[in-house]
Image (cartoon, rainbow, N blue to C red):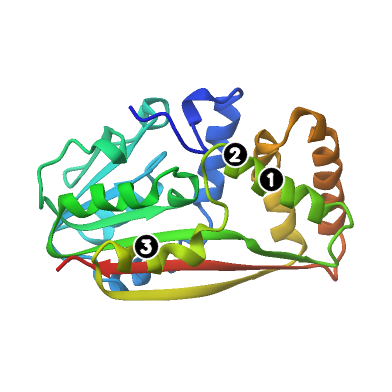
């Protein structure tokens, strides 16, 4: 299995805690998920693939809302997949997206969420996903751009922490700014009818507290060990901000899809 990229669950310490946090973060913004799939051409029948499914929360929604579509969900980590329930139109498999164990032109739809920001070679990954798509099938990618996350009033410690998080992710082979590049990647890879949504996520104190609890501590892995104390300080400052009733949180989220000719 290809062992490059900025998120390797199987190599993390404290994986049980991280798995719990992954499951909590995956619950975010589920209300509009089915409508999003429909906007981007999810098939009413056929085959769909989810890449980087983790505990399979979105894969189960796909299978429930589209009962005539068989959903295959893959992840690098068997540890994350081990307790995922199978259904008649849903199956899980350990696999690497660079080395997909599926025939050419097998799926009508491929979906990846928060995968591409961790990839060392996104164009190679897109080529792998394109290979298993049928002609006329669509690839849908949801991802973030860490430059597009804002807190107001931002703690003085946040900017330095956030820059070091992004630098560390790049050193490990990921791209914290991949969101803005996805449409270009799909066009470069020969996809047609490329559609982009930039979604604005707005929040307040409780949303900041949720991020502080479930996401920010895991990002300390990107910091040089000498910087981790200042990272903990920045996270504590964000927690203090979350208790401010006037605090605000803003984030721009990228949703991009394209069709295979």
Q: Residue furthest front?
A: 188
What residue did someone put label 2 on? 171
Q: Residue at x 52, y 44 (%)?
A: 174
- Sequence-wise, the earlier of marks 2 and 3 is 2
109 vs 18, left or right, is left
Which sits in the foreground, 253 or 259? 259
Is mark 2 in CB contact (under 8 Å) with mark 1? Answer: no
173 vs 39, left or right, is right
- The quadrant in which the N terminus is found is top left
Report if residue 226 is visible in the image.
yes
- Sequence-wise, the earlier of marks 2 and 1 is 1
Q: Position of residue 88 (x, y in %)?
A: 16, 43
Q: Position of residue 249 (x, y in %)?
A: 72, 66
- Sequence-wise, the earlier of marks 1 and 3 is 1
Q: Residue at x 18, y 65 (%)?
A: 260
Task: Estimate how packed mark 2 is, as few (under 14), some (14 to 19) or many (20 or more) residues with alpha carbons within 10 Å.
Answer: some
What residue did someone put label 3 on? 185
**Quadrant of residue 172 in the image?**
top right
What residue did someone put label 1 on? 165
Task: Estimate how packed mark 1 is, as few (under 14), some (14 to 19) or many (20 or more) residues with alpha carbons within 10 Å.
Answer: many
Is mark 2 in CB contact (under 8 Å) with mark 3? Answer: no
Is mark 1 in CB contact (under 8 Å) with mark 3? Answer: no
């Amino acid at each position: 299995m290809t062992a490059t990229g900025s998120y390797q669950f199987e190599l993390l310490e404290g994986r049980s805690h991280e798995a719990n946090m992954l499951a909590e973060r995956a619950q975010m913004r589920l209300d509009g998920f089915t409508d999003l799939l429909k906007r981007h051409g999810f098939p009413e029948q056929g085959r769909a693939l989810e890449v980087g499914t983790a505990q399979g929360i979105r894969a189960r929604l796909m299978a429930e809302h589209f009962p005539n579509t068989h959903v295959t969900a893959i992840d690098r980590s068997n540890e994350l997949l081990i307790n995922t329930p199978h259904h008649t139109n849903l199956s899980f498999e350990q696999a690497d997206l660079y080395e997909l164990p599926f025939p050419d032109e097998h799926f009508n739809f491929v979906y990846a969420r928060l995968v591409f920001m961790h990839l060392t070679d996104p164009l190679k990954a897109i080529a792998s996903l394109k290979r298993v798509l049928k002609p006329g099938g669509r690839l849908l990618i949801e991802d973030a751009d860490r430059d597009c996350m804002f807190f107001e009033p931002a703690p003085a410690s946040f900017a330095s922490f956030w820059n070091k998080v992004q630098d560390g992710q790049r050193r490990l082979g990921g791209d914290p700014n991949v969101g803005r590049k996805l449409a270009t990647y799909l066009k470069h890879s020969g996809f047609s009818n490329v559609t982009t949504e930039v979604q604005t996520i707005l929040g307040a104190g409780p949303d900041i507290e949720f991020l502080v609890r479930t996401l920010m501590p895991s990002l300390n892995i990107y910091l040089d060990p000498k910087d981790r104390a200042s990272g903990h300080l920045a996270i504590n400052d964000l927690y203090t901000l979350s208790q401010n009733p006037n605090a605000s949180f803003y984030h721009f989220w990228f949703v991009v899809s394209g069709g295979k000719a």
